[in-house]
Amino acid sequence: MTRLGYQIPNFTYPGVGSDDLFDAIVRQAVEAESSGFDTVLVMDHFYQLPMLGAPENAMLECYTLLAALAQHTSRVRLSALVTGNTYRNPTLLAKTVTALDVVSKGRAQLGIGAGWYELEHDSLGFEFGTFTDRFERLEEALQIVTGMLRGERPTLAGKWYTAREAINSPAPVAPIPIMIGGAGEKKTLRMAAQYADESNLICAIDDIPRKLAALDEHCARLGRDRREITVTYQTSACIAPSAAQAAQEADDAVARIPELASRRASLILGAPDDVRATYERILAAGVDGVTVNLPANGHIEGRVALLGDTLAPLIA
């Protein structure tokens, strides 16, 4: 499971066009693998998110990209953070993730969530529905996907999805871990307790103990051993050899992509010692690991490696 994950959240880099975009992404994945990250993750979106750029900014379909990255890496797990359940029928998703596992020789991980980006759904023709609809869909999907990934032939006549003796062949090379993203205490963490191997939290650092307590309670009620679930915490950083350089690179990113201004203040920003201190505080709150993205400067050669070299000793 993930203990130190590197997420690539954007594909709009200065001076980089479609013809050399993949090379820039591969460089980040290779740096992540060589510097101690155990998982490389990408977002499952078709439009860029409003806090990271304009909708028309570059976004690559995640499972095609992950399968391609599998050919340039050898150790890191590969995952979406997280798959939007509303974008694929669960039987197709099970087949897709299994194909990723086969081509990566057993390194696939399924990160999944209910979906939330309404503009993307409306523009591209995906049914959005209500909050309740999306969580009902997610639960039905998990029943189908988990069965298929385990070699079962699930049947479901649900409100949203149907499957009849669904076959998944070839089987995964190795068991595919399931990560559920989100921190909702009633629905999301209950599903994590029931179905997942990993819970990826997005919340304030001070809220982590309360989220962990909620997960503990769900596990106890469901008879699940809480120790079976890895808990990671999602973060955004901007690291550079000096604090001044990190600040300048964050400012340069905002100048290129004004939407990043809303994220500027929340970045874990600074030189390695500054960044390390914040992650020590996060880990002390009780999580097992972290996922990190570098939306401002991950495209700069050496920054992902610097981040891995800084954080990997904290996870070892």
Image (cartoon, grey):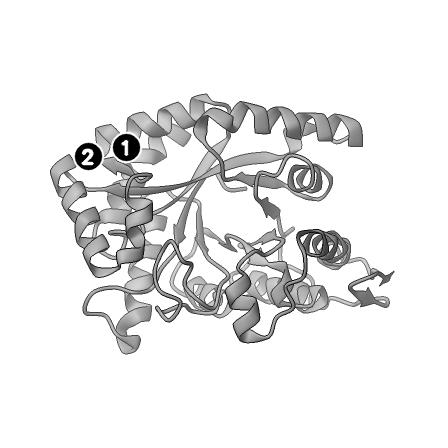
Q: Where is residue 9 in the image (x, y as percent from the top left)?
A: 39, 56
From the top left corner, tell me how far across and down residue 68 is, in percent: 44, 68
Residue drawn at x 70%, y 54% as measured from the top left: 138
Q: Name the residue under label 1.
A: 275
Q: In the rendered image, which quarter is residue 101 located in?
A: bottom right
In contact (CB < 8 Å): disc 1 and disc 2: yes
Q: Nearer the viewer, residue 110 or 38?
A: 110
Q: Is residue 288 above or below residue 38?
A: above
Distance, label 1 to label 2, CA atoms, is 6 Å
| Residue 316, visible in the rendered structure | no
Q: In this view, does 195 lie above or below 138?
A: above
Q: Which amino acid does label 1 sit on?
A: Val
Residue at image coords 49%, 35%: 203
Would you say 218 lies left or right of 64 here? right
Q: Residue reaching furthest bottom?
A: 19
As drawn, is 49 to the left or to the right of 263? right
> Which residue is tagged 2?
271
Count residues near mark 2 (Cα–Cα under 10 Å), then give few for <14, some for 14-19, many for 20+. many
Q: Helix or strand or loop: what does disc 2 sit on?
A: loop
